Amino acid sequence: MERPDLKNTLGRLLGPSQPEIGCDACFEELDRYVELELAGKDADAAVPGLRAHLEGCPACREEHDSLRAFVAADRPR
Amino acid sequence: MPTATKTPLDEGAGRRQRLRVLDAATVGAVESVIPSVAPPASLPGPNDAESLEWLRCLRAEGTRDEAIARLHALLLRAARFEVARRGATFPHLRGNELDDIANEAADDALMSVLRRLDDFRGASRFTTWVYKFALLEAAAKVRKRAWQGREVPLEPESWRLFSSTGLEPDAEAEQHELLATLQSAIADVLTPHQRSVLVALALNGVPIDVLAERLDTNRGALYKTLHDARRKLRKHLEERGLALDDRLEDR
């Protein structure tokens, strides 16, 4: 059996250490956050707690990564 | 700070109104969910001309049908992007199934966007705002389809996930203490519901929207339960002097 990744297991069980927003608030802010990221702005300062939520929520992280990739491909900067 | 407005995260697929094709009857159906209030004269935020034009066309009698068709095409493109991206992870999903998922996702996203048109505040481009609805719907549908017919494990499938081999004796002893404490905390400190949610999501890898559907709840409520469980475990470990930062950094 392959050696399990302890850090990943602990990370999934214990979640982010920083304060985070929930899934609903993440969805509400995701478009603004992604545009700020793509514009090189400080998205984390503008939307506190969203980055921590992405660390703790795989589904929201997938959707963030997809929106960022799709918008970047849709509107090359 | 969830809003009172119902979001796509709250909506069960079975309760949704299904739009399969964008024919005349469908356009009539989606029009009924467009808020009839007049758009505000000026919206807060950095509204660009293209976004304002989208809003104008979707609200004006003469341009609405054509704008809805264009919007559906945008949403379908985003949904297909997401389905292709996620579908590679699930090789048992066939191409026609994936295209069905993309179409269903675009239809559901269209309903959500039109229902929530007045919620658009111009904090991003209109197209970015609508894309997130299509991507969320498509991602959730792929996850649900991949788990269709599978049992959702609410108990640890194997505590071997906690074990590790090949460590130095000191590190192994330290790790053993941490894992034993964590395992007993999961059993003793959490409520039965918190334990089931934590184990399913964090240990057994069940997607959150799949679990929400099986437990007849929504994603936001489940994540709150997961968050509360994690806080309890962290507090329990910290009270016992088990430092976590070194173990969790650089994840």
Image: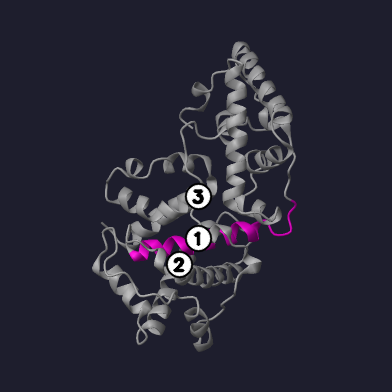
Residue at (36% x, 65% y) in the render: B127
Residues at discs 3 and 2 in contact (Cβ within 8 Å): no
Residue toward you, B104 or B13: B13
At label 2, counting other C-alpha atoms closer than 10 Å, the crowd grade (few under 14, some 14-19, many 20 or more) is: some
Frontmost residue, B108 versus A38: B108
CA–CA distance between discs 3 and 1?
19 Å
Give left or right: position of B250 versus B219: left
How dense is the environment of label 3, judged by Cα within 10 Å: few (below 14), some, or many (20 and up)?
A: many
**Residue contact between numbered discs 1 and 2, judged by CB atoms under 8 Å:** yes
Residue contact between numbered discs 3 and 1, judged by CB atoms under 8 Å = no
| Count of all numbered marks drawn on residues in the image | 3
* Image position of B229 with respect to B76: above or below: above
Label 3 sits on a secondary structure element that is: helix
Callout 3: chain = A
Q: Mark 2 points at which residue?
A: B116
The picture places residue B21, in percent across and down from the top left corner, at 53, 81
For discs 3 and 2, the disc positioned in front in the rendered view = 2
The tag on residue A17 is none
- Residue type at tag 3: Cys
| Quadrant in which the C terminus of chain A is drawn | bottom left
User: Mark 2 is on which residue type?
Assistant: Arg
Region of the chain picked out in magenta, as a range: B126-151
**Label 2: chain letter:** B
Q: How crowded is mark 1: few (under 14 residues within 10 Å), some or many (20 or more)?
A: few
Residue at screen point 60% across, 14% down: B168
Image quadrant occupied by the N terminus of chain A: top right
- Of circles 3 and 1, which is in front? 1
Amino acid under disc 1 = Thr
> Residue tagged by mark 1?
B5
Disc 1 to disc 2, C-alpha distance:
8 Å
Q: Where is residue B159 in the image (x, y as percent from the top left)?
A: 72, 31
